[in-house]
Image: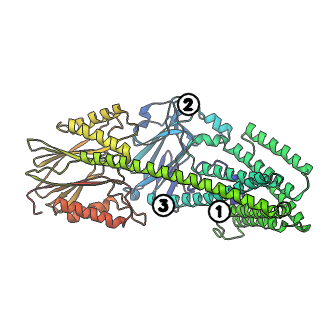
């Protein structure tokens, strides 16, 4: 329950927030998903925990037609209370067959892979997603966790197969740390709504914890200064250490929430106990020092017990996770008793400390009452314990400040206070001077970077065609808008003497200088290979050349089109669909050719399509920057709307078509800067009514 927020936030729970309770229906060994199984707030479905498993490694296991009937059914999350599957040596394959209700076909799906290892996820034999790096040994394997949902789609076949190549050579270490070593897979349908919800939730958590860390850090720093100026008031040091422990546990919470390294969870449990015990001991040390003349013997007993608890949880990581939390609760209860006794004895300022204890106690009490049903759900703000602890910190800080002020008035004359103020002023002036020097240095560096980016932008634009070529049978127009100074989109053409026109439209991964490097390499390859008649041969040679350049995870999505008389030959490597407006019918034909971006896989089976063109037909190539524009309501323009708009203006000249699409994009974003580059190339066959 949230009542235990200071401790339970450290306990690693695979799945965490957003894990659905609904499970889809299972028929024998074939998993079935229908609309009834997606009844959560955002249409979640948790895939079953038991998949077919086989140890070892063979690429044939990804084939959807592979016979896995003899494989063993195992629980994929590899829980610590069960032994590892027979034959497990750190690498194996898991398979799950499933069907989807026809009513759900055609809808985009999202998936989230919760894992503590490294994996390659295949859907119907095609690599869908890679998380981490799967290797045959621990040295070759890179573990990684997924925090967001990713989108995928299903074709019209009746049965599908998820095949997952999974590696975790540290599985036994995870079990010894009382942690899962495997994976779980979740799917859902309302992708955009889920992403917005997760984004808002993460932002809220970051803001609340950033506020807690910032304010707590400022108060801790203040009391460290007070101790430095007057070491006899050692309670300021103890209080700063107490706040520091709270800040460390807050940082650990953020790490627990957003870390993508599974090995973090090998130490999260013992670290949680250590921090919990540290907070309890610092709280007792501070309370006894403020309200007692000397430390009681009970404090030394608490130190011995605390160290014993810390030693136990680091030696045996499967120990009961509640022991550290109980130690923290006991310490806070003792601190509350000390404050109440001080208030009864009317110790000066004790009522301020009492307000702080009341603040944290009330916040925990409200959360506890809501958790056990005495208060309605969602009546209490989720971060109430955070603000309760802040109330305690502020009250104790005020209490210490009051004591310090009283002592200072008794022991120091006004001259000493004036000297302190003078020293503080000099320190502030020094900092202001350093900040000004730093600002000037940053400004000079910024101007230099801007100049370099402008030069890079000018170089990139110079590589684009100054104008589209004149062609007796084709009318052409092009447009490109970059999201940053150096964009990743690219278009080009080669006109041959026999009337053949070769057009290239591409989109490099990312933006900025790296994307500009990929664009430069692609243009060079296009100039060298564009005259070749075989589009697939161009793709193959380009991919090999890009991989030899070792550009490190830089890829180029590219569409190549050759206009030969009244015929169009088309091939695509990871680009959006090509749209063809048919003048005879007044309808738009969507040409989808799936393929991986250039530079990713050698010998990828790209496909070429040959299409007939008639007078008045218009072909539109575009990058994904246009259909994936977001408005201020976080709504995406979408491919369907792009097709509809193009169909309405496709009878116009290419320049007018592009101008209409660009204006639609500006109106849709309503002044919001685009997240991606946007490129159009429109080509119309002469002789139509337009």
- Mark 2 or mark 3: which comes first in sequence? 2
Residue drawn 61% across and 35% down? 171
Residue in front for this viewpoint, 492 or 543: 492
Residue 424 lies in quadrant:
bottom right
Q: Cα distance, mark 3 to mark 1?
A: 20 Å
Q: From the viewer's perspective, is 191 left or right of 8?
A: left
Residue drawn 22% across and 46% down? 492
Q: Which percent across, then down, holds residue 600? A: 36, 38
Q: Which residue is mark 2?
A: 138
Q: Which residue is mark 3?
A: 196
Q: From the viewer's perspective, is 470 left or right of 9?
A: left
Q: Which percent across, then down, holds residue 553? A: 40, 39
Residue drawn 74% across and 46% down? 273
Q: Which quarter of the figure is the C terminus placed in?
A: bottom left
Q: Cα distance, mark 2 to mark 1?
A: 40 Å
Q: From the viewer's perspective, is 303 left or right of 92?
A: right
Residue 607 lies in quadrant:
top left
Q: Which percent across, then down, holds residue 351? A: 83, 68
Q: Cα distance, mark 2 to mark 3?
A: 36 Å
């Amino acid at each position: 329950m949230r009542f235990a927020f200071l401790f339970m936030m450290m306990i690693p729970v695979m799945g965490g927030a957003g894990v659905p309770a609904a499970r889809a229906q299972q028929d024998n060994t074939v998993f079935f998903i229908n609309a009834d199984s997606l009844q959560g707030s955002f249409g979640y479905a948790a895939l079953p925990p038991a998949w077919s498993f086989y140890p070892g490694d063979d690429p044939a296991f990804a084939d959807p037609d592979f016979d896995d009937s003899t494989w063993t059914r195992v629980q994929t999350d590899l829980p610590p209370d069960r032994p590892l599957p027979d034959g497990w040596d750190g690498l194996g394959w898991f398979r799950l067959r499933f069907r989807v209700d026809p009513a759900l076909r055609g809808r985009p799906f999202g998936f989230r892979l919760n894992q503590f290892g490294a994996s390659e996820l295949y859907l119907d034999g095609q690599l869908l997603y890679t998380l981490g790096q799967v290797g045959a040994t621990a040295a070759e394997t890179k573990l990684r966790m997924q925090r967001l949902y990713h989108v995928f789609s299903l074709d019209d076949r009746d049965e599908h197969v998820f095949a997952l190549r999974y590696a975790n050579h540290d599985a036994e270490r995870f079990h010894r740390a009382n942690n899962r070593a495997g994976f779980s897979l979740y799917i859902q349908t309302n992708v955009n709504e889920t992403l917005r919800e997760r984004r808002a939730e993460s932002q809220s958590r970051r803001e609340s914890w950033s506020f807690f860390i910032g304010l707590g850090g400022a108060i801790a720093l203040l009391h460290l200064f007070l101790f430095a100026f007057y070491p006899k008031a050692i309670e300021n040091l103890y209080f700063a250490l107490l706040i520091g422990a709270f800040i460390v546990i807050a940082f650990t919470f953020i790490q627990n929430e957003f870390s993508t390294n599974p090995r973090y969870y090998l130490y999260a449990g013992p670290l949680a106990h250590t921090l919990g015990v540290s907070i309890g001991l610092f709280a007792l040390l501070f309370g006894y020092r403020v309200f007692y003349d000397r430390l009681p013997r009970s404090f030394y007993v608490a130190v011995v017990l605390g160290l014993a608890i810390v030693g136990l949880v680091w030696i045996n990581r499967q120990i009961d996770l509640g022991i550290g939390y109980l130690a923290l609760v006991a310490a806070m209860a003792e601190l509350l008793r000390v404050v109440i006794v001080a208030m009864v004895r009317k110790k000066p300022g004790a009522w301020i400390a009492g307000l702080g204890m009341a603040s944290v106690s009330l916040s925990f009490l409200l959360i506890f009452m809501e958790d056990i049903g005495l208060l309605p759900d969602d009546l209490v703000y989720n971060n109430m314990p955070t603000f309760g602890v802040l109330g305690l910190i502020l009250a104790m800080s005020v209490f210490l400040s009051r004591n310090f002020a009283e002592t200072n008035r008794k022991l120091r004359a006004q001259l000493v206070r004036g000297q302190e103020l003078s020293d503080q002023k000099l320190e502030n002036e020094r900092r202001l001077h350093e900040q000004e020097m730093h600002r000037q240095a940053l400004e000079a560096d910024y101007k230099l970077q801007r100049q370099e980016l402008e030069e890079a932008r000018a170089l990139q634009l110079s590589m684009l065609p100054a104008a589209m070529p004149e062609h007796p049978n084709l009318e052409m127009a092009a447009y490109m808008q970059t999201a940053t100074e150096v964009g990743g989109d690219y278009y080009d053409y080669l006109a041959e003497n026999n009337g053949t026109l070769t057009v290239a439209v591409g989109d490099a991964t990312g933006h900025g200088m790296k994307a500009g490097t990929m664009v430069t390499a692609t243009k060079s390859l296009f100039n060298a290979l564009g005259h070749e008649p075989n589009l697939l041969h161009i793709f193959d040679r380009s991919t090999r050349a890009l991989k030899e350049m070792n550009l490190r995870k830089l890829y180029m999505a590219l569409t190549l089109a050759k206009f030969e008389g009244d015929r169009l030959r088309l091939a695509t490597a990871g680009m959006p669909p090509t749209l063809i407006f048919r003048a005879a019918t007044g309808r738009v034909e969507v040409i989808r050719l799936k393929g991986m971006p250039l530079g990713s896989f050698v010998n990828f089976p790209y496909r070429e399509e040959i299409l007939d063109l008639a007078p008045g037909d218009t072909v539109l190539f575009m990058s994904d920057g246009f259909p994936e524009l977001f408005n201020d309501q976080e709504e995406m323009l979408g491919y369907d709307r792009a097709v509809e708009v193009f169909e309405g203006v496709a009878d116009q000249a290419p320049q007018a078509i592009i101008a209409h699409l660009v204006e639609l994009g500006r109106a849709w974003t309503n002044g919001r800067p685009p997240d991606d580059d946007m490129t159009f190339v429109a080509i119309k066959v002469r002789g139509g009514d337009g």
